[in-house]
Amino acid sequence: MAGGSGVRRSISILGSTGSIGVNTLDVIAQLGGTDAFDLVALTGNSNVELLARQAREFGARIAVTADEENYTALKEALAGTGIEAAAGRQALVEAASADAGWVMAAIVGTAGLAPTLAAAARGADIALANKECLVSAGDLFVHAVKEGGGRLIPVDSEHSAIFQSLEDDQHHAVERIVLTASGGPFRTWSREQMADVTVEIAKAHPNWSMGLKISIGSASMFNKALEMIEAKHLFDLNPEQIEVIVHPQSIIHSMVGYTDGSVLAQLGAPDMRTAIGYALTYPDRPKLNVERLDFVKLARLDFEAPDEVRFPALRLARTALARGGVQGAVMNAAEEVAFDAFCAGRIGFLAMADIAEEVMEAMAPHPAATIIEDVFEADAEARRRAAEIIARKEMAA
Ligand code: NDP
């Protein structure tokens, strides 16, 4: 039984059909499956077949597809099982509001914000993979978790590493955190070489197997930019305390530097199940069937300074951190629109950062968000502006 208490833990997975969702279910299976866990809600979007299979296998009470057009297919796939099928954005929020004590937030993009907020507001422990919640809603999201009374446990491997390397009651002695970045597939490429890359080339991450959005974000380093903002809010840091170092082997997942010169790090094979397992059983450590590090085989760990000229996303994150307010939401929303356009072959790889920067400039300064609707408004305006820039670029091409 989970935690050895004999009581099945109730959990939900928002985004169960994605890379993090599938890994979460693998961890759950390793830790006792349905004997140990009571699956309340599973959610997906386009992959109805997988969602239905997961719901049947893990005996979920509710399965939700975000896309209303998939409702009939989901209902048919679950016929006779007693599992409730639902569809649409409101249904996602309702599923997140159902009474699971632990919720994995693993929807990709800002679409994850409303359901994760709903789970946070009712006091669930949030295992946070969806970094966009913190990038967009920042302090408001942290406040919602505090008000709800649940815990916020990072799942992003870098933030999990920092979480694990932070000593209790020593926040005052933290000098800096060092986020490691693999550098992605274009670590050594020039901007000229990156100009014409396709989605197929950009998504081929050297170390990690992940969803499409984060894989492309690793290639452009937009993912690291989001992680810098995520770290600020998760660990209550000043922007100057956040460093990025390129570490091509992805073995050190991130580090914390203290005032006595010590640096604590968390290391492991590049496998998200370690961070997911830790978030599930925290403060205990689960027994997981994942690869163990062989230091003799590894032989060396390399480090390089990040290049903010070839990878301007890092510079944009610094700008967003310095400006504060809704600039994180603006950067993220503009980049999501630009990412979709890149995937559709409408713009080139390098244009993603150009578009995000243009929208950020156009929307600065911007009044800070005091309620969550301010965030949604800034997000919508940034999307509108990004779409206009893309249309203009297409006209000019
Ligand atoms: P995937 O693209 O693999 O999965 C995304 C999930 O969200 C799927 O379940 C997908 O459903 C669902 N989804 C997609 N669009 C919507 C929508 N509009 N509304 C509701 N649900 C939607 O992503 P990842 O698992 O890679 O990443 C998920 C989150 O975790 C991201 O925020 C990412 O940055 C973060 N993360 C991921 C890591 C990784 O290793 N993958 C590492 C660290 C953080 P469907 O597939 O059915 O369409």
Image (spheres, helix red, strand yellow):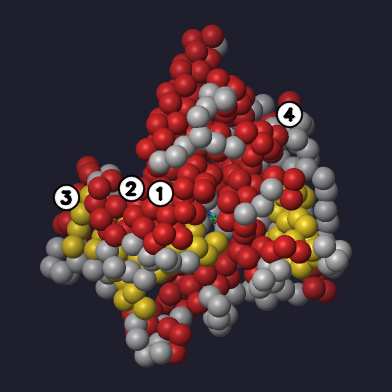
The residue pinned by badge 1 equals 112
Give, as a three-letter code, the residue at label 2.
Answer: Ser
Disc 3 vs disc 1: which is toward the camera?
A: 1
Give the residue displayed 29% in from the left and 60% down from the top.
97
| Quarter of the figure with residue 271 | bottom right
Residue 219 position within the rendered picture, expressed as x and y whole percent measured from the top left: 64, 42
Indicate left or right for 187 with 348 as reference.
right
Q: Nearer the viewer, residue 71 or 281?
A: 281
Give the residue displayed 23% in from the left and 68% down from the top.
61
Mark identifier at residue 72 = 3
Disc 2 vs disc 1: which is toward the camera?
A: 1
Marked residue nearer the N-terminal end (2 or 1): 2
Secondary structure of residue under mark 4:
helix
The residue pinned by badge 4 equals 191
The residue pinned by badge 2 equals 46
What distance separates the C-alpha of mark 3 from that of mark 1? Answer: 23 Å
